Amino acid sequence: MDDITWVKNADEAHQYLETGARDVVFMSYDDTLSVALEDGFNGTAIVWPVHGGMLSLCGTVDPSANKSVVGIDTNTGYARALRYHLSTSLSPEEYEALDWVKAGATELRFQALMNGSLDATLLNPPFSVLAEAQGLACAPMAEMLGPFQGTVAHVTRDYLADPANVACLQALADASAAVVAGLRSDPTAAVDALTSFYNTTSDTASAIYDALWQPNGLASGLCFNTSQLAGTEAIFAWDTKLEVPAKRPWVQDIFC
């Protein structure tokens, strides 16, 4: 487990998980539901939460002002949350006028938004804060979505069957939790690192840092929050008309 692959979109992440081509796949909880209930892949397991989405709608959605090009990754994932929000905040005519563009993963959508090929898209930190620093409006989605589970760590059930793999996962989970704890305990060092890494101002880096600790921010531990899971499930069910099993067989809280 020493190779890192940055995917172009969530479909690629689905394939890596379902084929077992990667040991651990990080993607949204909506994608968990998509893999299990739409793709019919029964071999997935999620083993710890990463964050609650931290989503903001950046740019402008206003079909009457010719602002109707909305970027999404794929039809799954955070796109469902965006469809839910816009379908309830726009008139039916305005919603039907939207041009949905599959523009790839977050950093690709950020680039498309900044070069003007998209009018709006969902972003999370650092990209939402960097977009605001460039003068774009970004509206936080936390209040509209309520409790919401964003990214989670996925493996296959076959992978979990090997105790050596579980030990490796434990080490990765503990290391992830330690990084979060370190960021939280030393804000000055964290902001300095963010300033350098993103080549930005300390004010922008501070805003990125602050966004990590909002209620929809980084997970404070390795246990899943059932209200966050339920929030994402409700949007998935609204969009797909599929029932989500109450037992959640894919949730494996083994590090909780």
Image (cartoon, rainbow, N blue to C red):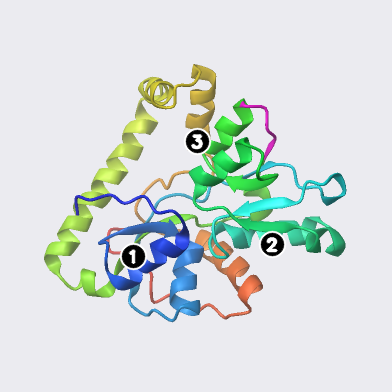
Which residue lies at the image location 86% right of the left edge and 62% below the top edge?
Answer: 93
Chain part drawn in magenta: 134-138
- Element assignment for label 2: helix
Q: Amino acid at mark 2?
A: Tyr
Q: Is residue 252 visible?
A: no
Q: Which of marks 3 and 1 precedes in the sequence?
A: 1
Q: Which residue is mark 3?
A: 126
How many C-alpha atoms fall within 10 Å of the one at disc 1: few (<14), some, or many (≥20)? Answer: some
Q: Which of marks 2 and 1 precedes in the sequence?
A: 1
In the rendering, which numbered label is found on residue 16?
A: 1
State if disc 3 and disc 1 touch (CB < 8 Å): no
Q: Amino acid at mark 3?
A: Pro
Which residue lies at the image location 84% right of the left edge and 58% below the top edge?
Answer: 94
Question: Marks 1/3: CA distance?
Answer: 25 Å
- Element assignment for label 3: loop
Which quarter of the rendered picture does the N terminus lie within? bottom left
In the rendering, which numbered label is found on residue 84?
A: 2
Vertical comparison of 101 with 207: above or below:
below
How many C-alpha atoms fall within 10 Å of the one at disc 2: few (<14), some, or many (≥20)? Answer: some
Which residue lies at the image location 46% right of the left edge and 78% below the top edge?
Answer: 39
Question: Marks 1/2: CA distance?
Answer: 27 Å
Image coordinates of residue 57 in percent, x first then y, are 66, 45
Question: Marks 3/2: CA distance?
Answer: 24 Å
Image coordinates of residue 153 in percent, x first then y, are 35, 58
In the rendering, which numbered label is found on residue 88?
A: none
Which residue lies at the image location 79% right of the left edge and 60% below the top edge?
Answer: 95
